[in-house]
Amino acid sequence: MSENNKMLAASGYRPYDYLSSPIFVDKFLAEYYPVSLVANITTAVAEGTSIRYGQEYVFKREPEAEWFDLRKNQRMEPSEITIETVTMNIGRLRGFMVKVDSLDYESVNGMKTFVDAWIKSAKRKLSEYIDRHVINAMAHGAAACNKGNAAGIKYGNYQLGVTGAPVTINKDNILTYMMYLGLVLDEQNAPKEDRFLILPPEARVAFMSYPMFQSQCASGTAPMTSTEKVPNINGFTLYFPSTMPSYGDPSGKIAFPIIAGVKSATYFAMGMQDVKAGLENADSWGKYWRGRSVFDWKVVRPEFLAVAYATIQI
């Protein structure tokens, strides 16, 4: 038995217990959220082993306050608060099953090292899958008046692109389109806090002419992965995920959804279920490790999302 496996055994765990719930689940979720894009662009409403497939969650939306002009001795009438609820069903699953042959088991230099390496790969692959689908859901779930060639609930005078006629974003106009998206959110009274902007990695090139971005590149702090960010440009934190969805537009161009929003626009829930380790099969020498991730998301404030349908000109 390897030294690391002996240490686990001495602490009361069998070596493969490190792969089982709750040890594995707690470690996986603790490490998943800090490196995932979805943690930065959604509000996590539930997580952990308590989440079950098919479970229904009911949330209360935050009430909106009202203020009134007053005169001295004026009789006041109270405003009524309507409690709105949002329902989200957990209906998405991803699973894994791994076998470690008995001949290989002792050659692993400590099961903890083996699991740490697997978790690193697993969280990246699951994050890529979820990030891509959440971005796509936001693009389609944004309020109709917050996208298209008549965007803006007040005046409808922002041209943000439509199927067949995407706008072209380049270094000369990228800040202008950022401003348009911000103004569309402003017209919806979207919160200024936690605003983000999601762009394809190609858009980094369009920023290279701006001093702020140049200085970050020179210092090595410019974002190179989906969760690294450029803070506070026109009030947005910028993300450039490699998982950005793209669409083959009828114009023959490749178009992207450039998404501006706030975290409270989309809810996200995720947990792990039925994680088991040390399972054996009579037809095979070795131990099996399997589990399922249950998760889902829902756009609950579509008015707090704005989308430009665009091509990127490098």
Image (cartoon, grey):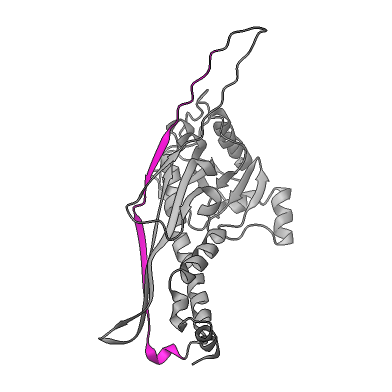
Q: Residue 143: which quarter of the image?
A: top left
Q: Nearer the viewer, residue 76 or 295?
A: 76
Q: Is residue 147 visible?
A: no
User: Is 130 located above or below residue 1 in the figure?
Assistant: above
Q: Nearer the viewer, residue 39 or 80?
A: 80
Q: Residue at x 61, y 53 (%)?
A: 205
User: Is 57 located above or below residue 74 in the figure?
Assistant: below
- On whether residue 84 falls in the magenta region, the answer is yes
Q: Is residue 29 visible?
A: yes
x then y, percent, for residue 242: 51, 58
Range drawn in magenta: 77-106
x then y, percent, for residue 261: 54, 41
Label total for image: 0
Toward the front, the furthest residue is 12
Q: Residue 228: which quarter of the image?
A: bottom right
- On whether residue 196 falls in the magenta region, the answer is no
Q: Nearer the viewer, residue 292 or 301?
A: 292
x then y, percent, for residue 28: 49, 66
User: Is 269 located above or below residue 94 in the figure?
Assistant: above
x then y, percent, for residue 259: 51, 43
Q: Residue at x 37, y 62 (%)?
A: 94
Q: Residue 71: which quarter of the image?
A: top right
